[in-house]
């Protein structure tokens, strides 16, 4: 699952505000804000929608358990 740090970094790569992400994910802005600030244990559908929106925006989320460690990067263009 995405971490608050990954969410912030992914938004920065895309040049998105929290409001942009909330709109893209179709979830309340307050949910994004609380998640990124660690004030809420956001789970389930909200996190899934956040991840989907960021991926649609062109970000690849790197898993903390993977060989590259937790992070984000711009996804490579599809042929």
Image: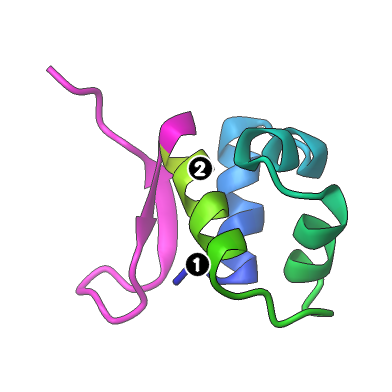
Per the rendering, the mark at residue 54 is 2
Question: Residue 62 location in percent, x, y?
Answer: 34, 62
Q: Is residue 48 or residue 62 the one in the foreground?
A: 48
**Tally of numbered tags:** 2
User: Residue at horizontal 62%, vertical 42%?
Assistant: 25
| Alpha carbons under labels 1 and 2: distance apart | 10 Å
In the image, taking residue 75 as reference, residue 43 lies left or right, namely right
Q: Is residue 1 magenta?
A: no
User: Measured along the vertical axis of the image, is residue 62 above or below residue 37?
Assistant: above
Per the rendering, the mark at residue 2 is 1
In the image, taking residue 63 as reference, residue 37 lies left or right, namely right
The reply to whether the C-beta atoms of the residues labelled 1 and 2 are less than 8 Å apart is yes
Could you say whether the residue bearing mark 1 is in a helix, strand or loop?
loop
Magenta stretch, residue numbers: 56-79
Q: Quadrant of residue 76?
A: top left
Could you say whether the residue bearing mark 2 is in a helix, strand or loop?
helix
């Amino acid at each position: 699952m995405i971490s608050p740090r990954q969410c912030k970094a992914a938004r920065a790569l895309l040049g998105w505000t929290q409001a942009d992400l909330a709109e893209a994910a179709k979830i309340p802005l307050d949910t994004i804000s609380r998640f990124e600030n660690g004030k809420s244990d956001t789970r389930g559908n909200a996190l899934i929608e956040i991840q989907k929106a960021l991926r649609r925006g062109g970000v690849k989320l790197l898993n903390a358990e993977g060989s590259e460690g937790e992070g984000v990067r711009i996804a490579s263009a599809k042929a």
